[in-house]
Image (cartoon, grey):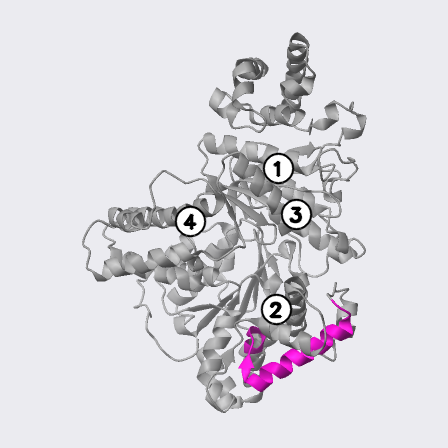
């Protein structure tokens, strides 16, 4: 019906809660969240739309189950997809007075169990894990006489991972890859041969990869009754987050854990199914009510993240998707105060698009918005380079998500070692000044980010540690350096990086689960979104639509969607904007404009009006100086001015195409034109 680790260690268990604690757990939830949190016996399916308080709901559900005596904390296993999400679950449960719940990723839970049972199941200690899959894949490729480079090795490794997560053997792979329309790096038969050789190499070395962790753990539960009895006796209640992303291998392990029981709560959003290419199977979520006819299905649709304007656009995008079978659909209901309408901007070429985005980011930062609250999202990682260059030219710091992990950066490792040494020296000084002093010893200077990419990145990493210390002291005034070092170790273990002050550059896939005040979704042309290889498969095209939905719902307040008609300046402006914008964005007028005006087409009404006013002023200035119009200011610069509306010469100087000479010659006139149009 629809209504609106193994081991018996008990450390961390909570004492008996006060009688009113269960009611207090539900008190701060809305009606839909409260219904979900009170459904403590399974099977339960929580359909949680973007920004609807999913994590809050499931942690309160677990806490309510504990406080009402339905759950013993140590008998609850909450499964997440990232170590960071698991750490957040544990932290929130602790704040609700609940300790002892096991919150882990599939792989972490399987590793803990397999390490414990390895002597019984494998006849010896836990095998070594393959830390570098590419090395083993390279050897397998060489044995099969394939010529590879690093990119093709990564693709081969991805194919092997896909095969294993979908439970395809080397013998099955060619047919399964064809049925799934996989874009394989070599002929499917050749990939299958590498896959078989890879498995033989692991067997010969007595090692396991991360997919094997799940497979062997599931096998242990399926084939060893004593192991199954012990694990199922330990874990009685299961919660699985992001259930739309579960693959067949993970589902097999989950089924083995359950052993036919139905004490299961799954949480997911069919509209955020974007990982089918990795083996994720949304049918597990969509078919949940078919599998469990008595399941309670609860919908969370009140969006507390985004303004109604952003929510409305997200609903329109996903509302154009064909209806899928199974569970009911979700329609978000914005709960925040109103904000600006999303903007749709068309540009002549990618560098101009990037320059306009960088100028807008510069204006936001100058206006007081922290750079870390801004994101630029694109479909493929190759699109990042032009935005990295544009932001650097505009003097805007940025962070490339998906690069080296924060706690693995050399400067962070060095800083943590120094902080640990200072803590061992029993430094009794105040935390924040001490952290600043320690980092100053490795060249960090407050408020003075150095020029250059690598030096700037190093400074930002160290500044993030200082900012974290400041935030923690605000919450825990008595925190000392030893406590800070312990906190850093916990964050490193959970890969929970502190905030680095820079505009985030990320792929749409990497942005899932994150949010920012201002988001720029860029490069929205057919062949990029939807990506070219999806165009002959309707199901793949619809996954691309969901990817755009995910990108849009990352924005809290300000949202800009843009595209460019040509890849390079001077190129033919023939690229069609994404089909997903049809009926949503204002109609493109590029084909009806004069050649001079096509250089920068702004679809936002107010900006368009200012753009025309600036062009009129430029014509007069060019005539007076007897020079061509573009010598005064280029169209891309006029567009950046129209979009950002600078109020001072400093703001104007930050825009592309405004050097010292042009600032002196035209700056006051430009500002007067902007002011007159306000």
Spatial separation of the CA atoms under disc 2 and disc 3: 34 Å
Of tags 4 and 3, which is closer to the observer? 4
| Mark positioned earlier in the residue sequence (1 or 3) | 1
Q: Main secondary structure of the magenta part?
A: helix
What residue is pinned by disc 1? 354
Disc 1 secondary structure class = helix
Q: Residue at x 65, y 62 (%)?
A: 151
Disc 2 secondary structure class = loop
User: Which residue is at the front of the view, 563 or 95?
Assistant: 563
User: Which residue is at the front of the view, 661 or 603?
Assistant: 661
Dot 1 crowding, Cα within 10 Å, few <14, some 14–19, many 20+: many
What residue is pinned by disc 3? 548
Of tags 2 and 1, which is closer to the observer? 1
Spatial separation of the CA atoms under disc 4 and disc 3: 32 Å
User: Which residue is at the front of the view, 389 or 262?
Assistant: 389
Q: Residue at x 57, y 78 (%)?
A: 212
Task: Tell me the quadrant of the picture where the C terminus can be found.
Answer: top right
How many numbered marks does the figure carry? 4
Q: Quadrant of residue 659?
A: top right
Dot 2 crowding, Cα within 10 Å, few <14, some 14–19, many 20+: few
What residue is pinned by disc 2? 294
Confirm or deny contact between disc 2 and disc 4 (CB under 8 A): no
| Mark positioned earlier in the residue sequence (2 or 3) | 2
What residue is pinned by disc 4? 458
């Amino acid at each position: 019906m629809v209504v609106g680790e193994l081991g018996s260690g008990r450390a961390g268990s909570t004492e008996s809660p006060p009688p009113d604690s269960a009611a207090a757990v539900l008190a701060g939830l809305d009606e839909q969240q409260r219904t979900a949190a009170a459904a403590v016996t399974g099977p339960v399916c929580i359909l949680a739309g973007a920004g609807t308080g999913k994590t809050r709901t499931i942690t309160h559900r677990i806490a309510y189950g504990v406080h009402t005596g339905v759950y013993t904390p140590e008998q609850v296993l909450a499964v997440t997809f990232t170590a960071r999400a698991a750490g957040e679950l544990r932290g929130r449960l602790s704040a609700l007075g609940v300790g002892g719940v096991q919150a882990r990723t599939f792989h972490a839970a399987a590793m803990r169990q397999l390490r414990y049972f390895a002597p019984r199941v494998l006849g010896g200690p836990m095998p070594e894990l393959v830390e570098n899959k590419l090395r083993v894949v390279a050897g397998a490729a060489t044995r099969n006489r394939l010529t590879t480079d690093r990119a093709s090795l990564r693709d081969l490794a991805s194919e092997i991972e896909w095969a294993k997560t979908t439970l395809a053997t080397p013998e099955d792979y060619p047919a399964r890859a064809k049925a799934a329309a996989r874009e394989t790096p070599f002929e499917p038969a050749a990939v299958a041969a590498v896959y078989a050789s890879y498995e033989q190499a692991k067997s010969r070395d007595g090692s396991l990869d991360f997919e094997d962790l799940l497979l062997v753990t599931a096998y242990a539960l399926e084939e060893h009754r004593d192991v199954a009895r012990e694990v199922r006796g330990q874990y009685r209640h299961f919660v699985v987050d992001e259930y739309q992303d579960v693959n067949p291998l993970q589902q097999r392990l989950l089924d083995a854990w359950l052993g036919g029981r139905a004490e299961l709560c799954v949480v997911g959003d069919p509209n955020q199914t974007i990982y089918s290419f990795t083996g994720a199977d949304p049918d597990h979520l969509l078919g949940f009510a078919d599998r469990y006819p008595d399941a309670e299905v609860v919908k969370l649709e009140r969006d507390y993240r985004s303004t109604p304007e952003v929510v409305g656009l997200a609903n329109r995008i996903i509302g154009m998707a064909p209806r899928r079978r199974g569970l009911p659909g979700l329609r978000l209901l914005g709960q925040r105060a109103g904000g600006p309408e999303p903007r749709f901007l068309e540009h002549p070429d990618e560098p101009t698009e990037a320059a306009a985005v960088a100028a807008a980011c510069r204006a936001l930062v100058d206006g007081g918005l922290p750079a870390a609250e801004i994101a630029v999202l694109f479909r493929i990682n190759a699109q990042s380079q032009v935005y990295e260059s544009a932001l650097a030219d505009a003097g805007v710091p940025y962070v490339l998500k998906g690069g080296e992990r924060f706690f693995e950066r050399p400067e962070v490792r060095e800083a943590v070692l120094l902080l640990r040494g200072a803590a061992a020296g029993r430094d009794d000084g105040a935390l924040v000044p001490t952290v600043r002093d320690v980092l100053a010893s490795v060249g960090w200077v407050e408020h003075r980010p150095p020029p250059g990419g690598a030096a700037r990145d190093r400074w930002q990493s160290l500044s993030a540690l200082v900012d974290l210390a400041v935030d923690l002291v605000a919450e825990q005034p008595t925190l000392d350096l030893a406590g800070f070092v312990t906190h850093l170790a916990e964050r490193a273990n959970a890969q929970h990086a502190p905030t680095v002050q820079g505009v985030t550059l990320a792929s749409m896939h990497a942005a899932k689960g994150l949010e920012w005040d201002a988001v720029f979704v860029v490069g929205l042309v057919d062949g990029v979104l939807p990506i070219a290889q999806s165009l002959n498969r309707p199901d793949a095209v619809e996954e691309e639509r969901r990817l755009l939905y995910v990108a849009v719902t990352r924005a809290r307040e300000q949202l800009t969607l843009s595209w460019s008609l040509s890849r390079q300046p001077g190129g033919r402006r023939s690229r069609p904007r994404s089909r997903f914008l049809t009926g949503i964005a204002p109609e493109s007028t590029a084909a009806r404009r004069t050649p001079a005006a096509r250089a920068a087409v702004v679809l936002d009404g107010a900006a368009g009006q200012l753009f025309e006013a600036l062009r009129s002023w430029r014509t007069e200035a060019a005539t007076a100086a007897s020079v061509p119009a573009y010598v005064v200011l280029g169209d891309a610069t006029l567009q950046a001015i129209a979009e950002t509306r600078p109020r001072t010469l400093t703001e104007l100087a930050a825009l592309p195409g405004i050097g010292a000479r042009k600032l002196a010659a035209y700056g006051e006139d430009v500002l007067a034109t902007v002011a007159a149009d306000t």
